[in-house]
Amino acid sequence: MIISLYFLFYNIQFKKICQLSIKTVKEKFGTISRDERFNKAVTGLLLLLFSARLYQNTGNFYVSAFPLLIWVIAAAFGELKKNKESWKAFLWFIPFLLWNLISVLWSDHPGYSLQRAVFAVFITAGFLSAGYLFTDYLKEKFTFHYIILIPLILLSLFSMLSGIPGNSWSGGNGLGFMGFASHQNTLAAAVIFTLPVLFYPFTEKVRISPGKNRLLIINALLLTGALYILISSHSRASVLAFLIFFILFALISLKKGSLIYVVPALFLIGAVVMFSPLGKKIEDYAYKSAPSVLSTRQEMIKASIDGAKLGGLTGLGYGISHRDTSIVLAGDHERNGIFVREKGISSLGIVEETGITGLILFLIIYIPLIRRVKQSYNFTTRQKLFILSVFLMYSVHAQFEAWWIGAGSMFYQIHFFTIGYLIKNS
């Protein structure tokens, strides 16, 4: 009898807990349709599969995600037909992609250029569509970054603690940590490209609640790990891009009237640091055991400038590098008899391949994004400035790593996923 009463009481309490849990989940995650849940699962899986390219010996996993890309393009097309404003925003990307295809006509290797241009259309359309279809978790923003960032931090910390793999500290002339990533610059770039999810909650008014506090604590722990990995990578381009973003983030987070005190203070602190023993360490970090900051990139910069001069107004053809610019850089190689050079600087790389015309058409793609965000009621002024600082960080990084012209790059893909996401959520 006592046992029966106990189980009856337990069942009643269990039902109450379940009802409360369901209510809590709905409040946290919001009520979304079955299609939205499916879209979230597919786009999340897509990001996970493509992020495998960040790591050693897993570069071919992304091929299995191609059917998902075809599906998200079709699904996004169906959604866009219901929203004329979003459809108009997507049309701005066509001239840039079409010009890449047209450049095949004057390419020295039209077959190769055509292959690259078609792949760029497929990847760009796919990741714009995936970003457009993605639905956030926890009623927060940019939560798709967690899909890449959390595994990256966990694997990197495991590598640091275990010493596995054996070459984990061999990046950047033996100075940088790379963990399981294919290169230390790749690791650092993946960190900064996914950091916005950790900073965005600080652009909102603080809401005191257990759930919100837990999220802030988790974000703080993730941020600590991410910054430690970033600095350990010794990737100067990523560190510089992040510092620019962080300074802008700090400035837009301050109250009006505070800048008159903060800006001079920053200059004063910077001057003190540079003339202190810490400044010498920072100098060594920046110079990377070379005579000057740009010593390791001077030849690449010269080759990029020469290539851009040859590109002129229309370019040499999408994916093409001119042999006259070859000075035997680390990334130079032959692919089926076609010379391929590591371009390094995105803006000059675009001019070399598709000319000044191509660069203008690429920059035009930001017009619908800026317009949508500016007119949006979903973001406060501070959040709009935050989004601007994120894309400025991406653009600064692109001038050191030429992913603007590499559709196969994970950073090209995250970039366009983010644009599609913001077009939908603005």
Image (cartoon, rainbow, N blue to C red):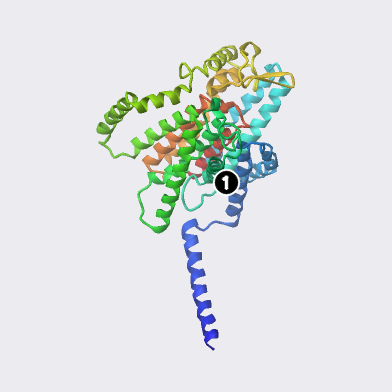
Residue 79 visible within the image: yes
Question: Residue at coordinates 54% horizontally, 36% vertically from top-left?
Answer: 190
Q: Is residue 104 left or right of residue 413?
A: right
**Residue 357, placed above or below residue 226:** above
Q: Which of the two residues, 337 or 2, is positioned nearer the viewer here?
A: 2
What's under tag 1, amino acid-wise? Leu
Residue 426 visible within the image: no
Residue 213: % across, % down = 40, 54
Question: Residue at coordinates 70% horizontally, 27% vertically from top-left?
Answer: 115
Task: Work out which quarter of the rendered image holds the N terminus and state it.
Answer: bottom right
Q: Which residue is mark 1?
A: 133
* Mark count: 1
Q: Which of the two residues, 384 or 235, is positioned nearer the viewer here?
A: 235
Question: Residue at coordinates 62% horizontally, 24% vertically from top-left?
Answer: 99
Q: Is residue 82 left or right of residue 232?
A: right
Residue 20: % across, % down = 47, 68
